[in-house]
Structures are given as C-alpha cells and as structure tokens.
Image (tube, grey):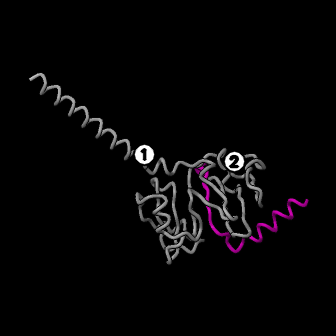
Amino acid sequence: MNNILKRFGLLLLLSVIFLAGCQEDDKSNTDSDIMSFDSDSFTVENEKFYLYGITLDDSKAKVIEHLGSNYEDVMNLELSTSEATDSAIQYNNGSVIILFNKDEVVRGIYIDNIQQSDFDKIYNSYDGFKYEEFTKQEDKYDPNNIGFIYSEKADHLLTAKYDNKRILMVRLKSPDPNFNELLEYINNQQKQ
C-alpha cells in the first residue's frame, strides 16, 4: 500500500510540474511581452523604419506571422482620417494599432503610451533628418509639440507627440502632402 501511495504521489507531482510548465509556456508569448515598447523596438534597415520588426508596405499576413494572431480587428475612423486606410488590427488592448489599405498592406503603425526616454534614445541615435520641440517649449506635454525623424529615401516618418492625457504616442507612416511645408518652415527656423 505504501508503495502504491508513493507511485501515486510521484505521478501527481509529475502531472503538476508538467501542467505548470505548459502554463509558463503560454505566458511567455503574451501580447504584453511582445508589445512592451523600448528603444530596441525601433530599428532602421536600408533607411526604412521598423517597429517590432514590421514596416510600411508589409503585408497583413507578415504582421500576423511576426506579431502573432492574438489581435482584434478594428476600424477607428478617427485614427484613419488622414490615412488611406481600409482596415486596422490592434494588439495589447489598442496600445498598438496597425493600419492597412485595401490590399492589406501596412499604411501606418500607431503605438501609445511609450516613455519619453525611449523616444529620446531613438531620436538621439538617428543620424538622419530629425526635429523635436519637447525641450523647446515650457510645457513638453503640450499636444501641439512634436518630435520626428524622417527618412527621405524610404519616405518614412516616425512622429512622437503627447495627447491631451499626457500619453506619448508614436506613429510610423508616410508623410502627408503638407509635410514639405513643415520641412521648409523648420529649415527656415534653423537658419535664423
């Protein structure tokens, strides 16, 4: 009888260890782990900007393959008014939103609630055209302040600005038609 109890106890212990290991594996690939943003989440390859390993003009299938299938289909018209957007998916309860055109090609990547220090690392490490107003204004949280880096060759624009709730948002997209006017204004201001 004692031998049977020992075997049963050992079997029970092995079952618990196995189940606990399975649960740890499930936890290791959650959206929050994938979507935590830091300066390493941003890379530049061939002058194209990448966030979480994806970039503009990537396919929806590539995004899902790279970021996982734990997303929600959304269409937030407020986000897409200036974008040629036909659909969107979100990860991590909306803190990461990927915008697509009708051909299911990435048109924009929106990330909310990043740390200013992480954007500063990206900004300071980038050697191309860049501009930021956060340190030039009395209130860096002013939603009118903006920071950005721009790759003319790839036509990629990474912007950062605070919303009305003082949450820093990062956007990767192609610049809109008014961007050249902004560049001209910035160049004139820097010459003065």
Query: Residue 131's image quarter?
Result: bottom right
Q: CA distance from mark 1 to mark 2?
A: 27 Å
- Residue 68 vs 107, above or below: the answer is above
Q: Amino acid at mark 2?
A: Lys
Q: Residue at x 43, y 49 (%)?
A: 29
Q: Secondary structure at mark 2?
A: helix
Q: Would you say residue 167 sits in the magenta stretch?
A: yes
Q: Which residue is mark 2?
A: 121
**Image quadrant containing the N terminus:** top left
Q: Are marks 1 and 2 in contact (CB under 8 Å)?
A: no
Query: Residue 149's image quarter?
Result: bottom right
**Image quadrant containing the C terminus:** bottom right
- Residue furthest out toward the bottom: 102
Q: Is residue 58 visible?
A: yes
143 relative to 4 in the view: left or right: right
Disc 1 vs disc 2: which is toward the camera? Answer: 1
Could you say which is closer to the camera, residue 189 or residue 35?
A: 35
- Residue furthest out toward the top: 2
Q: Which mark is residue 28?
A: 1
Q: Residues within 10 Å of mark 1 (few under 14, many from 20)?
A: few
* Whole-percent x, y for residue 186 in the image: 81, 63
Q: Residue at x 76, y 47 (%)?
A: 135
* Whole-percent x, y for residue 38 in the image: 60, 47
Q: Which one is earlier in the sequence, the residue at label 1 or at label 2?
A: 1
Q: Secondary structure at mark 1?
A: loop
Q: Would you say residue 75 sits in the magenta stretch?
A: no
Q: Which span is picked out in magenta? A: 164-192
- Residue furthest out toward the left: 1
